[in-house]
Amino acid sequence: KMTNGYVSITGVEASRLMQVEVEKWVNERVATPSSFKLPQALQVRLDEIKKTFDENRSKLGGSALPAEVMNEAFPPCINYCLEGLLAGRRASHMERFALTSFLVNIGMPLDQMVSFYTSVTDFDESLTRYQIEHIAGMKGNRTKYTPPTCNTLRTHGVCRNPDSVCKSVVHPLSYYRKKARLILKREEGKTAEEAESLNTATEE
């Protein structure tokens, strides 16, 4: 409502506008590469540690992740973030980070990740691409980020619709590994049953 050139807004609307501006301010600074450089000796040592960690990442987290992305193995929290994003719901910073870091770690193609954000009202492809590349360790400090733990997601209200698998894991990637194994075992079981049925029918 406009009165004498002024637009009246509610407290909720004012809070929303402030949230948008703060997020924009943070995103602009995250998207700006840092010029800070570590001492050479420290950088060399850090690179060695990072290389060792990357080479043993799957061992540290249990079994290796599936070679191909399995959408049906996504944890409920990630489905919540993704479905909300595709529906145009404005996601919090934690939701975006959790979703993006999860997709990065399971091997989702960059272009596909960018496409998920096109329905967001303030979508900026170049900024979105940079932020994803930053989380993937392709830009900035070259650190590949992993998703927050389940406890952190609960604290930020991102843990939604937990299922039976959630009770036995403490991290979204652990859920993904376990759910993927369960799905593959179930499919293998069906294949074995079908093969047995076919053999029986052939013998008859």
Image (cartoon, rainbow, N blue to C red):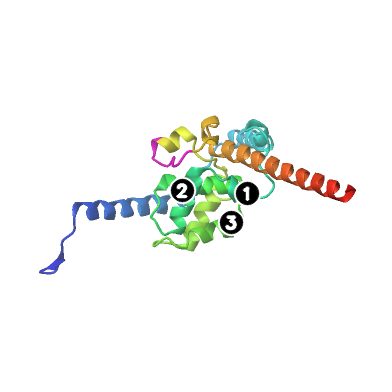
Q: CA distance from mark 2 to mark 1?
A: 16 Å
Question: At which x and y percent is residue 60?
Answer: 64, 31
Badge 1 is on which residue?
Answer: 70
Q: Which residues are magenta?
A: 155-162
Question: At which x and y percent is residue 122?
Answer: 39, 61
The kind of residue on which mark 1 rests is Met
Q: Earlier in the sequence, mark 3 or mark 2?
A: 2
**Nearest to the observer: residue 78 or residue 2:** 78
Q: CA distance from mark 3 to mark 2?
A: 20 Å
Q: CA distance from mark 1 to mark 3?
A: 16 Å
Any magenta on residue 161? yes
The kind of residue on which mark 3 rests is Leu
Looking at the rendering, which quadrant does residue 110 occupy? bottom right
Would you say the magenta stretch is mainly helix, strand or loop? loop
Badge 3 is on which residue?
Answer: 110
| Count of all numbered marks drawn on residues in the image | 3
**Mark 3, secondary structure of its residue:** helix
Badge 2 is on which residue?
Answer: 80
Q: Is residue 47 above or below residue 112?
A: above
Question: At which x and y percent is residue 169?
Answer: 55, 32
Q: Is residue 16 left or right of residue 24?
A: left
